[in-house]
Amino acid sequence: MIFLFFLYGFSGANDVSMIQKADVGIGISGQEGRQAVMASDFAMGQFRFLVPLLLVHGHWNYQRVSYMILYNFYRNAVLVLVLFWYVLFTSFTLTTAITDWSSVLYSVIYTSLPTIVVGILDKDLSRTTLLKYPQLYGAGQRQESYNSKLFWVTMLDTLWQSIAAFFVPLLAYWGSQVDGSSIGDLWTVAVVIMVNIHLAMDVFRWYWITHAAIWGSIIATFICVMIIDAIPVLPGYW
């Protein structure tokens, strides 16, 4: 529900409680008082700005937020499931699949920047198209981009990808002289490459900063893993 509050002829302060009750409070800045505008989620100077706010930015925001919720569940669950398969495979030993530093840096460096950039800049449809076809705004009301079915499909996709990320490197080096730390690095790199390519496949509109964030994060992962393995004093060193 959306409440519009015209401040022309109103004291402003009287509308604050209603704006705070609304799902989205929109204030029209007028000649009297600014209390309602200060309490609103969005403020505009003219009523005509409401159309692009709803049809364009409303659609973009719904699409971005919906995808980011599913993607963040996916990218975090993939790493957790890889650790889970390791625990099962090693019969619940006290060793870890990856270093402590890689566990921390996964959400700080390895995968954070692409998520932020795509979540802010990605656009599935142009402004002209959204204004020309107002019915596209109904996608959010029909929950087309985020619903329980999409969530469980994403979780199933996450499950098999985590199995592939764990067992492909393991079986590829089965019987070789590669030690556990090296396999752990392979799992880290495999997960980072997989989740970033997964994100790249879903991007609608590419910018130079999108390329820099996604491919730069993969390169940064290789650099960080080599640095972590090269410094014995770091916690979690094998």
Image: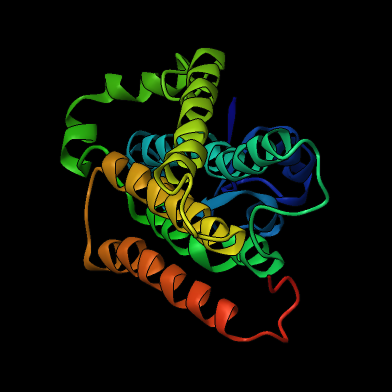
The quarter of the rendered structure image containing the N terminus is top right
Q: At x 55% / y 50%, what residue is drawn?
A: 42
Residue 85 seen? yes
70 above or below 205?
Answer: above
Q: How is the image coloured?
A: rainbow
x and y, in percent, of residue 85 in the image: 64, 35
145 above or below 62?
Answer: above
Q: At x 56% / y 84%, what residue is drawn?
A: 230
x and y, in percent, of residue 47 in the image: 41, 43
The quarter of the rendered structure image containing the C terminus is bottom right
Front-most of residues 127 and 26: 127
x and y, in percent, of residue 193 in the image: 38, 53
The quarter of the picture where residue 5 lies is: top right
x and y, in percent, of residue 38 in the image: 67, 58
Q: At x 43% / y 51%, what residue is drawn?
A: 190
Count of numbered labels shown in the rendering: 0
Residue 107 seen? no
Front-most of residues 123 and 74: 74
Front-most of residues 116 and 198: 198
233 above or below 178?
Answer: below
